Amino acid sequence: MSETSSRIEHAGEIERLLEAMSRPGGVSLAFEEQTAPPVNVLLANVIAGERLILDVTAAAEIASVLSVERPFRLTGQAHGAMVMTEPLVAEPCNDIPGRLRFACPYPDRLEVWHRRSAFRAELGPGMTVTVALEVDGVEKILQGKLLNLSLGGSLVQIPLQDAAKLRAGYALSRLEATFPSGQRFATRGEIRHVRTDAHWQRALLGCEFRMLTPKFERLIWFLVKEIERESARKSEQDDDLDPSSLFQPATTSIQVPPARRPRAEYATPMARRLAKIADYLNGQMVRLEQGEPIDSLLLSRHSDKLLNLLEEDREALLFASVCLHRDPLPVQHGLGVAIRLADLAAARNLPRNLLKAIAATAMIHDLGKALLPDDLLDSTLFDEAQRQQLASHVPLIHERLQGCRWLDPQAVRRIVVEINERLDGSGYPYRLGGSELSALSRMAMVVDVIDAMSRSRPDRGGWAMEETYRHMLTRDDLFDSTWVQRYIRHFGLHPIGCLARFTSGAHGWIQRLDAKGAPRQIAVVSPKVQLLMDKEIASLGGIESLVRAPAPELLPQQ
């Protein structure tokens, strides 16, 4: 901050600034060695060159501290600048009955900052400040972490999956930050930009403050100075600095939101690993909204990661694909299709380079929806014009793939472009049908529709797998019946990731199957949470039905 500040020593300028600060509510007092929040006081009189008179009647709790001549600084605003005095001490003057007034020396100099919005303090390691955001049009309260703070705004880190629908210009009805000490500030504001961090692991929101009262600005200025002081102490630039009380834990525990999601919120260890690929896709959605293309290198890297997970433990990955229910639907759906399509293709002994292209294109095939209006995606009933607008997500994402030269062009065409086509020509975007659609296109559309039908959307709830299979088997005018049957044989009548109701009345998630397609591992969720394997499953009775269900939360571990 030193490069934006100036020291004022001219007597006339000091008097001019102090006079401007003497209006009611214009000054805050903060003690030097005690970093409690500043309190508002009244600069009652400015006697040029001699002394200042402070009235602290409205903050009587500090009178005893002032009486023992504890050093303090005064801060306030004057002529569009933030002003701070050198350290001062005061003594009671008791000149007006019923008022608590103190006199202090007239300052020889003032520190002045003119470009208030440029004062940006960065929070380093160990300086965790939690943030809660209420965004107009977003139902849930978003939890994040403060990265920097200035008098004009802040940078807030939130999980990528929460940033998918945020845009520059969205109003913040409330931004509330909480320091470890319990000190808070709250304001209204606006999102100025949404981007990802350098590692594509978090979303970064640039937020501009809108409620800039003098009292609020003095509080923020105090917090900025304390953040800078704590940063200097932690970086060992000044060993004599005492720790800032802002970053000392309060006596009552403060909930600190995680950088992404708590460990316990992942249903399985594999879901935790898959979430890292979901983070990439969430970040890619944010980048697409900023006008950027698909990142070729990261797409390649995460496609390899997905195939490696599939080869390591396909059943664990299949189950993990139904667990990431907090991510945006295009991310959930893209991963679900990529995993099952790559698994089905691998069973056909396709070469690994083609499997990688299949996984890559399936992962991102739905991300073009990030470029469509939110009200369109949230619609519960589509007219013809809306359907045509929705279909535009295909060419939008296809265009952003042009820099991924390592991708097999046929895989891009068959999966990204043709996955939404239908045999009778009723699909989109080009109404292709019959012989125009290759075997890979036909396989992809079957996987795509089965996954999509199992997931809830604004216009309908998710279907149970039995209902989905029945629908697919009766629509050979739309879907290649050979691939529908191959899908059912490969993944089973009771696929991994389904919630089953057993004749005993128990409910459990199917996690693994034996060679005959019968469950060999069940995560029971009622009436008792437990993990049953192999012969233990017989105690549940037979499978009565597969039920519609939300994604699983924490489950018993093997």
Image (cartoon, rainbow, N blue to C red):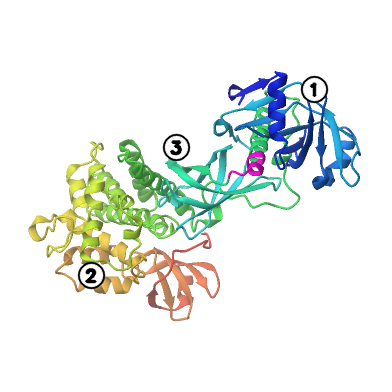
Q: Which mark is residue 49?
A: 1
Q: Which residues are magenta?
A: 212-219
Q: Residue 426, image x and y in percent?
A: 15, 64
Kind of residue at disc 2: Met
Q: Residue 21, image x and y in percent?
A: 70, 34
Tag 2–tag 3 contact (CB < 8 Å):
no
Q: Residues within 10 Å of mark 2 (few under 14, many from 20)?
A: some
Q: Which mark is residue 159?
A: none
Q: Which mark is first along the chain, 1 or 2? A: 1
Q: Is residue 86 magenta?
A: no
Q: Nearer the viewer, residue 266 or 63?
A: 63
Q: Which mark is residue 199?
A: 3
Q: Secondary structure at mark 3?
A: loop
Task: Name the outermost residue toward the top.
Answer: 10
Mark toward the viewer: 2 or 3: 3
The answer to whether residue 397 is left or right of residue 421 is right
Measure how far apart labels 2 and 1 are at the Cα level.
89 Å
Name which residue lies at 58% across and 22% down. Answer: 3
Kind of residue at disc 1: Gly
Q: Which mark is first along the chain, 3 or 1? A: 1
